[in-house]
Image: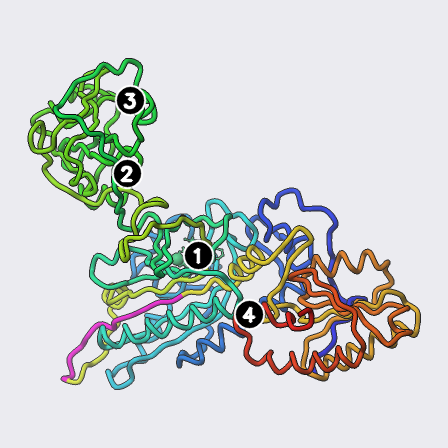
Amino acid sequence: MAEILHLSKLYMPTLKEDPADAEIASHKLLLRSGMIRKTASGVYTFLPLGFRVLKKIERIVREEMDGIGSQEIMMPALQPSELWHESGRWNDYGPELMRLTDRHDHGFCLGPTHEELITALVRDELRSYKQLPVSLYQIQVKFRDEIRPRFGLLRSREFIMKDAYSFHDSQESLQQTYDDMSGAYGRICDRCALEWRAVEADSGQIGGSVSIEFMALAESGEAELVHCACGYAADAEAAECICRPAVHKVDAMEKIATPGVHTIDELAEFLSIPASATVKALSGKGADGELVVFFIPGDHELNDIKADRAVPGFAFLTDEEMESFGLHKGSMGPVGLPEEARVVADRNLKGVPAWVVGANEDGFHYVGAQLGVDFQVDEWADLCIAVPGDSCPECHCALEGARGIEVSQVFQLGDKYSRTMDATYLDKDGKEQYFIMGCYGVGVSRTLAAIVEQHNDDDGIIWPPSVAPAQVCVLPLSSDDTVMNAATGIADKLAKMGFEVAIDDRDERAGVKFADADLVGWPLQVIVGKRGVAEGKVELKRRRTGERREMSFDYMEEMMSFVNRQMRNMPQGGTNLFASFFE
Ligand code: ATP
Ligand code: MG
């Protein structure tokens, strides 16, 4: 039988007011409910209730890792600098790496991740292809000196990560483990009751996906996503942009005076046409200094990553440089550009026969500049950041926008680390080969905060039963013996059934107990009052909906034993676990 949490003895320092420096719900509520405390910027202590939740998430992660045959290990957080010199990341990782020196003047870092350490481990131990594949994981503290630690556990400098690494002798074998990991990561999100999307973290240029990020949807998330009902989802920056610019039809090219018009919005308003019927020009230069002018639909933004892909080393021109090329900021266009300019246009403009665009003369624009007649395009490329309303690259329906918190990521590394760190095995012909590797990370403490971010209301946290510090809290409303005895009896019975139970046996007013129970977020409250006890009744409150129902002790027990059987398999983290009481 699980131990009952007696709130009279529990270190649960709840706060009435929102802490001043907490901006978002999860940060505020985790502090207010006495789950975590700040130790330093981006460094937190887990108090008993927060720690219980953390352990539960870890258990889910462990079960899923063990379930796909990954083996748990524990590597040190303290890592010798030599390994990081070998991989080249001692320099590349930059100021995020927490570095230190021991008394013998040896360099170390506090691990932000463990590719170096594990690669060094297996290169000395795994010799033969017969020993592959191998998948190892750990749940451990990580250190990153984030430039802007914020949002509590979401972006901290010390945090808990589950990191796994796999070693293979073929791409097929890597793909298999990568797929297993992706499946497990999806189940972890489900079991934590997260609403999530798996997004391709890069556009898979090499063919196939090499990295997927698992995003918990939340307004406070730092990642911008586009997604579609068909299941497609991508980071807005990584997504292919497919849009349909509006067409402003005119018979022939016409130059119009547009005094005072400098921006796309001003141009659209001046001509009374939508911004999507205009064409935006952006000038820059490539790594070799060559002049490049990009043309994109007026209602979209240039994607830096795509610009760099189309023109390696692309950088915008300064005002002086523009002047030296004879370019007119605010009225650039493809007609009459300097000879040497390389014209690269967004693919979506291919179908637009006549452009509304700058005339390369201050205060003038062209309408109906005809593609192939009045000007030429040298190259077409995918150049823009996808936005909601663009077409889904898979089914062509309109994309929706969302924001997300990256809770986990899977990666196909190939031989990136094994090559730089010279980690090899012998293949079946006795030849040395570099390991093919994958790495996979779950932000365990970030997941905890993401759950709160998705499951809360004005009164506090609403824990999904799968990760709640306890599923039920019994609330005796007076310290009267009959009430206390009844409450204790109920708590014992529920604990014997297999529930994790808390009892608020503090000498506090009913109002304080109610407020704290809502704040802490126990999924089910069993309220035991004087009148109820006299009648053999209790009141149940479901935190998620606020529904309340009075029922007899017997009926409550009967229902609880029924619900208890459902706890073995809780879809969506058991968010519906107690619904049947209130139907
Ligand atoms: P981000 O882009 O948010 O900085 P990342 O892509 O650098 O994260 P990874 O190296 O992929 O992070 O680490 C694996 C997981 O560890 C992430 O998916 C995230 O859940 C978690 N994580 C990373 N940085 C932090 C942090 N500063 N605080 C809490 N969790 C973190
Ligand atoms: Mg990541």
Q: Are marks 2 and 3 in contact (CB under 8 Å)?
A: no
Q: Earlier in the sequence, mark 1 or mark 4?
A: 1
Q: Is residue 306 left or right of residue 65?
A: left
Q: Main secondary structure of the magenta part?
A: strand
**Which quarter of the frame holds ligand 1?**
bottom left
Residue 28 image point, x, y percent: 63, 50
- The residue that mark 2 highlights is 302
Of marks 2 and 1, the one in the foreground: 2
Q: Earlier in the sequence, mark 2 or mark 3?
A: 3
Q: Provide the residue designation for mark 1.
A: 406
Mark 2 to mark 1 CA distance (whole Å): 24 Å
- Could you say whether the residue bearing mark 4 is in a helix, strand or loop? helix
Looking at the figure, which quarter contains the C terminus? bottom right
- Image point (51%, 62%), residue name: 194
- Magenta includes 435? yes
Q: Could you tell me the amino acid type at mark 1?
A: Glu
Q: Which residue is mark 4?
A: 573
Q: In the rendered structure, which disc, 1 or 3, sits on the residue that comes first in sequence?
A: 3
In the depicted view, which residue is nearer to us: 110 or 494? 494
* First reached walking from the N terminus: tag 2 or tag 4: 2
The answer as to whether callout 1 falls within 8 Å of ligand 1 is yes
Quadrant housing residue 302: top left
- In the image, the segment drawn in magenta is 429-440
Residue 456 in percent (x, y) is at 62, 56
Q: Earlier in the sequence, mark 4 or mark 3?
A: 3
- Mark pair 2, 3: CA separation: 23 Å
- Residue 20's spot in the image, x, y percent? 66, 42
Q: For the point 70% across and 68% down, which residue is it? A: 524
State the residue position of label 3. 271
The tag earlier along the polypeptide, 2 or 1, is: 2
